[in-house]
Image (tube, grey):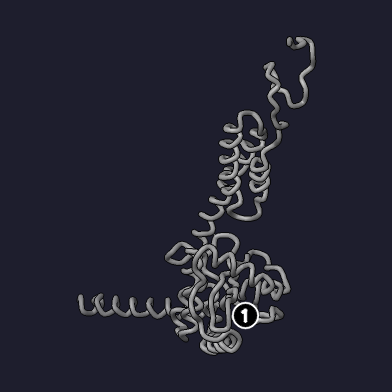
Amino acid sequence: MSTNPYAQPGPYDQVGTDTGVPMEPRRTSVLAVLSLVCSLICCIPGTGLLGVFIGVVAVILIGASGGRVGGRGLAFAGIVVGLAISAVWLLIGIGMAGLAGQFSNYAVIAETMDADDRDAFIAEMNPYSHHLITEEVFIDFGDAVADEWGAYQGPVEGLGEVIGAYMEQSTQLQSIGQQPGPGVGLLPVPVEFDNGRALMLMVIESSNPSTNNSGLPMPLNVGFPDQAGQSMIWLLDSGLSIPPAAPTTPQTPSATGEGEGGEGAEATGDDSEQAPSEGDAG
């Protein structure tokens, strides 16, 4: 029995053969679609790498299907997008890790406050504010923070812990109630107390700030929100503004004149003693 060479192949006929072997319709790989979806969920760290892994598996399975499964383009798109998203998250992680290391340096401020070491505390603060940090101001600030948060435990360490602390304590930032004044910025540093994590808010000069031995800007003022996130406990009453400058005592002209005149008189007296008189010369 001969076959009709002009007959159209049926939906289950093998194209290019005359055997008529039935085959399944071509379908798109579910893994290829899942790879692209995972890679596009860029707001969650790690989904990009998951998308890359699924995409590679999808390409292998598509190649082994003998043409029965498609979606190779979707799989490659998932791999490329996943790699790009993973690279972005890697850079963010490196930056956050460096920032977390800097936070441990700033935690010395909370440590010296808890230890009632005023001299060490002042050494970490901007010299512009030193004249305002009296013994009474320092003690009152430390007592208020201890009453609210308990004893200081240490800095929040680790990238994941720092991110978690910011997410947990984001409501504390609402307690500020105002924007930083001209010439200053705000740096929140998560620290650990007996009563939980708190954000230590530091007021930093915006331009040409004084720096410590680690090269970090020294704060003009330091504050902690209360646990309810309704009010702030500030070291200085200036809050988010630049503290008042230290008063200067100008030297009066009269005092300067007396000093110069006294020196001149002594010099004249010395000359008169050393110079011989005309009578002696005669």
Residue 177 location (% of width, % of height): 73, 74
Seen at 72% across and 23% down, the residue is 13
Q: Which one is nearer the viewer's eye here, 251 or 88?
A: 88
**Quarter the C terminus occupies:** bottom left
Q: Quadrant of the N terminus?
A: top right
Q: Position of residue 228 (x, y in %)?
A: 69, 81
Residue 71 visible in rendering: yes
For badge 1, the amino acid type reads Trp
Q: Furthest-right residue in view?
A: 7
Q: Quadrant of residue 182?
A: bottom right
Label 1: few (<14), some or many (≥20) within 10 Å? some
User: Is any atom of residue 137 visible in this view?
Assistant: no
Name the image quarter holding residue 184. Answer: bottom right
* Residue at 60% over, 73% down: 199
The residue sitting at 56% across, 89% down in the picture is 143
* Residue 137 spot, x, y in % from top left: 56, 86
- Report which residue position mark 1 lands on: 234
Q: Nearer the viewer, residue 184 or 191?
A: 191
In-front residue for pair 11/212: 11
Circle 1: element type: strand
